[in-house]
Amino acid sequence: MAPTIGPTLGGWITFSYSWRWIFFINLPVGVITWLLVRRFVEDPPYLRRLKSAGVKLDYVGIAFLIVGVGALQVLLDKGQEDDWFGSRFITTLVVVSAVSLISLVVWEWFQKAPIIDVRMFKNFNFAGSSLMMFMLGVLLFSSLVLMPLFLQTLLGYTSELAGFALSAGGAVLLIEMPIVGQLTTKLQGRYLIAIGWLALAAGMYYSTKRIDLQLSFRAATLLRIEQVIGLGFLFVPITLVAYIGIAPEKNNAVAGIINFMRNMGSSVGTSLVTTLIARRSQLHQLRLVEKARVDNPNFANIAHGLTQHFANGGVGRHEALSTAYASIYLSLQAHAASLAYIDTFMVLAIAALIMFFLSFTLKKNDAGAGGATMAE
């Protein structure tokens, strides 16, 4: 439900109140979840046996995980703002995160009851599924960031209207996922995954052809549907194939790592696209500025026409010329940013296409063996 109601509800809250109120959404959801866990969730037999055997919680592993992931999250959030390795603070966070996460892997490898069972990555299907879930997080949240950002900064949409433009795509995803869940009992998981990545690549590539400064609300809504229609073929099948070859007592570990990889992918994806937009906008602006010269007839004609327009409105000649140049520069910045969005969607399309080919390397699963139930 999060991709469905999140953008619309968040846009409405931001527009009507303040973006700070968005974080209070977690309160009722968290309380309800806690109550449901207390009521319905029980420890499996193998976990009760571990507790009765006196196996202690892996506090060292938890410490490495908290420090490593915490530093990684901060550097991803602040990296573009602080110019990445141009900042001593970001460089320090990179070192801390790298040392902590490498130490985590080494420590967990030799633990009997690790907080993260890194040995499971020796299973190719699990490793491949983890990579795909990471990339799914990257592409899902990248497009979730790109569309409202484009609509609000370049087309002047309010946060509420941008949320409504995204809501149709979320509704399609909500309807699609249960259907795909049923298909996993009839078709190979890797084939469903391949369909999903191919559809996602096509949606991102279509975005490069459709994104422009004349995009209407209807076109933006349809474009968002194109972008997400492949995601429904990925969530359940990727989770399903991750369990192939893994012992049943490792089910909790599989679920935890798969969700962790998706969350990390969302952080990396958000940081990636904001950095790409900023850097590519600068590049395209430099290229467009090269054409904005007085010896360029097209530029001269546009500047002259705008100057006349402002002068006819009662503005002085010198001020009219300055205003004309300012208007041209604003238009140039908007077009540079639009080209940066096209470049970013192309990067996402290539990433999805690579995942499409990788999906055929996954092992087959028995589609009628009830694996979908286990994955759920």
Image (tube, helix red, strand yellow):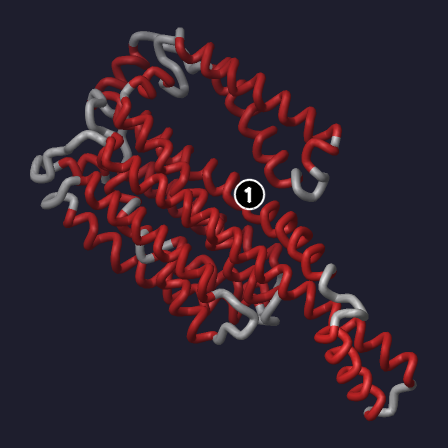
Query: Going 30% across and 57% down the picture, which residue do you hit?
Result: 174
Marker count (numbered): 1
Query: Going 52% across and 57% down the picture, which residue do you hit?
Result: 342
- Would you say 197 lies left or right of 69 here? left
Residue 372 picture quarter: top left
Query: Going 45% across and 51% down the picture, which residue do you hit?
Result: 28
Which sits in the foreground, 14 or 73? 73
Q: Is residue 16 visible?
A: no
Location of residue 224 in the rendering, given as x and y in whole percent from the top left corner: 41, 63
- Image height check: is 151 above or below 285? below
Location of residue 117 in the rendering, given as x and y in whole percent from the top left corner: 36, 18
- Would you say 245 lies left or right of 340 here? left
Type of amino acid at the residue the image marks with label 1 = Leu
User: Which quarter of the rendered picture does the N terminus lie within?
Assistant: bottom left
- Image height check: is 140 above or below 79? below
Which sits in the foreground, 358 or 272? 358
User: Which quarter of the rendered picture does the C terminus lie within?
Assistant: top left
- Would you say 235 lies left or right of 65 here? left
Location of residue 206 in the rendering, given as x and y in whole percent from the top left corner: 40, 61
Which sits in the foreground, 375 or 323? 323
What residue does disc 1 label? Answer: 272
Location of residue 32 in the rendering, given as x and y in whole percent from the top left corner: 39, 47
Q: Residues within 10 Å of mark 1 (few under 14, many from 20)?
A: some
In what element is the residue under mark 1? Answer: helix
Query: Going 82% across and 91% down the picture, which residue do you hit?
Result: 313
- Image height check: is 17 above or below 20? below
Q: Is residue 167 visible?
A: yes
